[in-house]
Amino acid sequence: MDTLLDVRDLRKSFSVSPGPLGGKNLELRAVDGVSFTLRKGETLGLVGESGCGKSTTGKLILRLLEADDGQVTFGGQEILGISPRRLRPLRRQMQMIFQDPYSSLNPRMRVGEIVGEPLKIHGLASGTGLKEEVLRLLKTVGLAEQHYERYPHEFSGGQRQRIGIARALAVRPSLIVADEPVSALDLSIQAQVVNLLQDIQEEFGLTYLFIAHDLAVVEHISDRVAVMYLGRIVELADAGDLYRKPLHPYTEALLNSVPVPDPARRDSGPLLKGEVPSPLFPPSGCHFHPRCPYVRDLCATQSPPLEEKGGGRQAACHFSDEVGKHRKHK
Ligand code: SF4
């Protein structure tokens, strides 16, 4: 499968005020050397707790934020250093779907205008052709003709997300960064929106970077999954392998936190303990060591690189071959 997106050593820090005590500004490394590829037509789930840098990674790729360092190659073209003029046609091919569809939809615009606006901006349709195209897009995402004249506040959360998807689809993108697209929705609606994203992926040949804080959400849509912790990817693998046998203690703990309906199938392996440390003061060595059930002395002093572990899998753990030893069901 061809590579659509190649992300190499992406970095972004923010300067944060130290607060009332004064002193020098602090450096928050939101994205700390992230690398991965996305193949055409696949879905990569990017998962981690809040504040781990996954949404920032998505925004850096689309240049909604400017990276400090690294490379992003889209369709063979490096995009981080290029001018806004050269970026514009590529921007069309890379769209974002947001977590909160309501705040990303202009409340004073009717749905027809919201979905039609990107078509006009990019000169893809006008006049009666524009309306026809918008109606076709509304139908594609499961909305009806009568929704064309309505305002965002007249819709439910799931319907608003459908409007956001129609707007992203309007410019015929090849890559969609979906930033927690179902997190704000009820469980029953989540499944409908995930199904819609899968249907349109097939129909339009889309590639997804699907960002979520929960491994359960991305399980059925992802071909591969990358797990982030405090600005770094700690595990990357085919979804089936990762869910069956995680190689990083953090992935294992996240999986154990996913509710399983049948108590007999509960793993009883280690759960996540404690809170995510502040990214302003990340722990030494392996950032996960204060929460890790497999921790040894080495972990506090040496940061494990993300490295090949065989079978196309990558993990950043000194003792990945021991992961799973606490589990009953393997
Ligand atoms: Fe745990 Fe050590 Fe592996 Fe980090 S390197 S995940 S602390 S065992």
Image (spheres, rainbow, N blue to C red):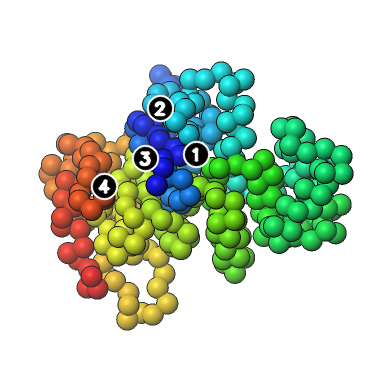
**SS for callout 4:** strand
- Residue 8: x, y in percent? 36, 32
Task: Identify the mark nearer the N-term, 2 or 1.
Answer: 1
Task: Identify the mark nearer the N-term, 4 or 1.
Answer: 1
Q: Position of 151 compared to 48: left or right?
A: right
User: Label 2 to label 3, Cα distance in Å?
Assistant: 11 Å
The three-letter amino acid code for the residue at tag 3 is Phe
User: Label 2 to label 4, Cα distance in Å?
Assistant: 20 Å
> Which residue is depicted at the point 40% across and 27% down?
71
Residue, disc 2: 71
Is residue 111 among what the camera can see?
no
Of residue 127 and residue 50, the one placed in the foreground of this image is 127
**SS for callout 3:** strand
User: Label 3 to label 4, Cα distance in Å?
Assistant: 10 Å
Of residue 64 and residue 41, the one placed in the foreground of this image is 41
User: Label 4 to label 1, Cα distance in Å?
Assistant: 20 Å
Residues packed near mark 3 inside 10 Å, few (<14), some (14 to 19) or many (20 plus): some
Residue, disc 4: 314
Task: Identify the mark nearer the N-term, 3 or 4.
Answer: 3
Residue, disc 1: 58
**SS for callout 1:** helix
Q: Are marks 2 and 3 in contact (CB under 8 Å)?
A: no
Residue 36: mark in rendering: 3
Task: Identify the mark nearer the N-term, 3 or 1.
Answer: 3
The three-letter amino acid code for the residue at tag 1 is Gly
Task: Identify the mark nearer the N-term, 2 or 4.
Answer: 2
